[in-house]
Image (cartoon, rainbow, N blue to C red):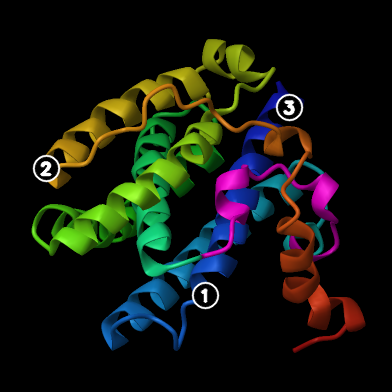
Amino acid sequence: MTDALKNLLYRMADDALILAHRHSEWTGLGPLLEEDIAFSSIAQDKLGHAQALYTILHGLGEPEPDTAAFMRNAEQFTCCHFVELPNGEYDFSLVRHYLYDAAEMIRYRALAESTYQPLAALARKVTGELKYHLYHAQTWFVQLSAKGSEESAARMQSALNEAWPYALGMFEPAAGDAELSAQGVYPGEEAIKAAWLDAVMETLAQAKLVVPSQAEPVYGGRKGYHTDYLQPLLDEMTEVFRIDPAAEW
């Protein structure tokens, strides 16, 4: 079970780390000052989530958190393509923010009942922060789609159309899921996806948005096959650490 558990932890940690970096790129560039602050705060939380997951991995024999985060190249990461994509306009970042955090809330709520106690304890702590993340994302998601202008609604629908196949890729099947489910550690991606679809469809109805038909999930990231955007992001993110990994700050 250890290999399957490590794979799950790396998937979650890598997703959180890369999306934290993308969110941080909105600092000073958001459409409102409050959004600069919100995205920066959420980015900081997600960095904390990633660090906590890498710390659990370190206890299972993996490298220290900073090494795991800053000393791997793109092909060694297991994040989904969804978190790698550039921020684009605010509408795309907001759609990604909502769809990702809706999935994370469901994932961590399930993990709060995990038989693997280090992960269950983390999940119970993280869900408190995710409530804020999801509330922020869902409020603006509905506001700009159903309560904004004709232009804002059209832009949100276009962003959803672009994001949806990548969002489905968050639930790329993993070989060890059946083993984790049998041990009561994690219910598996199909179960999380089903619950996510139920929650998201309810919000989409409120937002008056429509899921693109016949969208195929974009897979590959969990197996180390990434977009061309990931390695440049890692080069930027790890530049200072790689100058002197032994430095103390």
Asked if residue 126 is positioned above or below residue 88 in the image, the reply reads above
Badge 1: how crowded within 10 Å, few (<14), some, or many (20+)? many
Q: Secondary structure at mark 3?
A: helix
Badge 2: how crowded within 10 Å, few (<14), some, or many (20+)? some
Q: Residue furthest left?
A: 147
Q: Which residues are magenta?
A: 69-87
Badge 3: how crowded within 10 Å, few (<14), some, or many (20+)? few
Q: CA distance from mark 2 to mark 1?
A: 28 Å
Asked if residue 10 shows in the view, the reply is yes
Quadrant of res 160: top left
The first of marks 2 and 3 along the sequence is 3
Q: Is residue 22 left or right of residue 91?
A: right
Across and down, in percent, residue 226 comes to 74, 45
Q: Amino acid at mark 3?
A: Thr
Asked if residue 50 shows in the view, the reply is no
Could you tell me which residue is drawn at 39 percent across and 29 percent down? Answer: 113
Q: CA distance from mark 2 to mark 3?
A: 42 Å
